[in-house]
Image (cartoon, grey):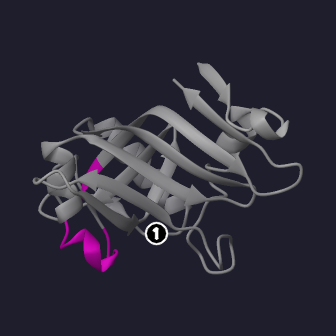
Amino acid sequence: METKNLADLYDLPLLEWGPVETQLGPALTQAPGTGGPDRHTCWLSTVNPDGSPHVTGVGAFWDDGAFWVVTGKSTRKGRNLLAEPRCAMSVSTSDYDLCVEGSAELVTDTAKVARIVAVAADGGWPAEVDASGIAVTAPYSAPSAGPPPWSVFRIEPKSATALSVHEPGGATRWTF
């Protein structure tokens, strides 16, 4: 991993990846009162067919060193990720504003789908693996996810940038 201090100009410290990644785990929920202005919202940036950006709020999970997104293949974000996997995920945690840039992959491994469904269920979303073994269903989801079943995408980080929101501050970019 390469690390670059983006705040050298201000003599601010280099941030460590470990504490940033720790805040992305199970503590990063979308329940009211858990972060951000009143909760954590992940923002997924994808590329539209004409090359323009598409940004949308999503439910996302951090597990095993990557972001995971559940959405319908026919949604704008799903179609964009299938056509052009380069994307970015942004979120504000309790201590950092973070952007992770990477590449999305449609997950078709039944064990990985089951794993992310377990992570979702542990976080309070009553998701289940559907009969195919590679898609997700639940009594509800975000309206922008489209109708079930939903597909799972894994966003493999290529780089990340974090800004510390507490004194003494700091800004660091990691290339994985």
| Residue 86, x across and y down, in percent | 29, 40
Q: Quadrant of residue 17?
A: top right
Picture layout, residue 129 above or below residue 82: below
Q: Nearer the viewer, residue 64 or 128?
A: 64
Check if residue 35 falls in the magenta segment: no
Does residue 88 appear left or right of residue 123 in this picture? left
Residue at figure coordinates x 65%, y 41% from the top left = 21
Picture layout, residue 150 above or below residue 81: below
Q: Which residue is mark 1?
A: 125
Circle 1 residues within 10 Å: few <14, some 14–19, many ≥20: some
Q: Nearer the viewer, residue 130 or 176?
A: 176
Looking at the rendered structure, the number of numbered marks drawn on it comes to 1
| Residue 157, x across and y down, in percent | 45, 34
Residue sitting farthest toward the right: 168
Residue at figure coordinates x 60%, y 34% from the top left = 173
Can you say which quadrant of the picture contains the N terminus? top right
The majority secondary structure of the magenta stretch comes to loop
Amino acid type of the residue that numbered disc 1 sits on in the rendered structure: Trp
Q: Quadrant of residue 83?
A: top left
Picture layout, residue 14 above or below residue 58: above
Q: Nearer the viewer, residue 52 or 63?
A: 52
Residue sitting farthest toward the front: 9
Q: Which span of residues is magenta-colored?
A: 138-152
Q: Quadrant of residue 148?
A: bottom left
Does residue 144 appear left or right of residue 175 in this picture? left
Does residue 48 appear left or right of residue 35 in this picture? left
| Residue 12, x across and y down, in percent | 83, 39
